Amino acid sequence: MDRRRPATARSDPDGNTDRALVRGLVNLLVAVVLVCSLALGTALFAPQLLDGLGVEDGPSPSPEPPPAGDRTPAVVDPDDPGNSSYETDVEVVRSAAVESFVHAKINERRAAHGLEPLEWDGTVASVSRAHTVDMARRDYFAHRNPDGQAPADRFQDVGDYCRGYGENIAQTWLDRRVSRASGDGIVRHQTAEGLATGLVNQWMNSTSHRQAILEEGRTPSWDRAGVGVYITDDGAVYAGQNFCQEW
């Protein structure tokens, strides 16, 4: 008769069985920890990888804008703020570059409708720029400022510069999701050229602004124009294009 007892941790006088069981438990715990670590790693990294799927690449930095014209005219609006800028993840968007792109894109739209290009006028741009910074600093958006001054008054302040004049204004944001001018979807402006395209699209999608650009309706024939853009520290953009009919 076999009187041996079933093997237990206490039946081995040398403790070998105890050590074997302990090693087995340790190996089991290590295996469980490894499995859990792999599962946790998958949970942590999978969302980051999924976030990158199906997302369009960001825009490329703007090329050099086409030269617009003289930026140091003899007559300058005393309230002209000069250049302003805002840094996005793509580039530093400078107001002067945006102005040049807007001027070029407006002339492209005019050419598509058989119109001559508008000549850049630094004084007209200065008047426009002074109005955009005033709108930003006094928090309004209108052709007439809180003091009651209209475009006619602003041109008289620089020597009654034009015989006839017109004005388009626009407001948007850099590095924020904003509605497209067409109302179809959203856009995020991160470059000077992209911002300029958005501003021109705003005007072209508005009947009165489009008429001013394309000299439609009762709009006179323009000789020259200037674009003024002011960008605030938080990325708000105020833009204006003034048209001029020479004496």
Image: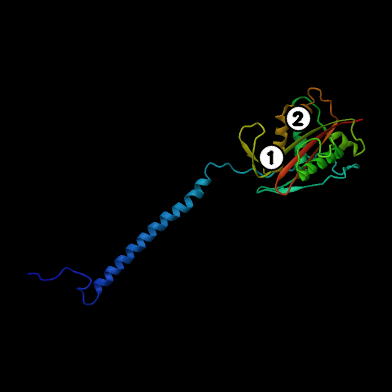
The answer for how far apart the CA atoms under marks 1 and 2 are is: 20 Å
Residue farthest to the left?
1
Q: Is residue 158 above or below residue 213?
A: below
Q: Secondary structure at mark 1?
A: helix
Q: Residues within 10 Å of mark 2 (few under 14, many from 20)?
A: many
From where the camera sits, is residue 46 visible? yes
Q: Which residue is mark 2?
A: 209
**Quarter occupied by residue 31:** bottom left
Q: Is residue 180 left or right of residue 131?
A: left
Q: Between residue 36 and residue 218, name the one nearer to us.
A: 218
Q: In the rendering, at what x and y percent does residue 30 appear?
A: 36, 63
Q: Earlier in the sequence, mark 1 or mark 2?
A: 1
Residue farthest to the top?
217
For residue 194, which numbered disc appears in the image? 1
Residue ID at (56%, 42%): 55
Q: Between residue 156 and residue 186, name the one nearer to us.
A: 156
What's under tag 1, amino acid-wise? Gly
Q: Secondary structure at mark 2?
A: helix
- Specify the quadrant that holds the N terminus: bottom left
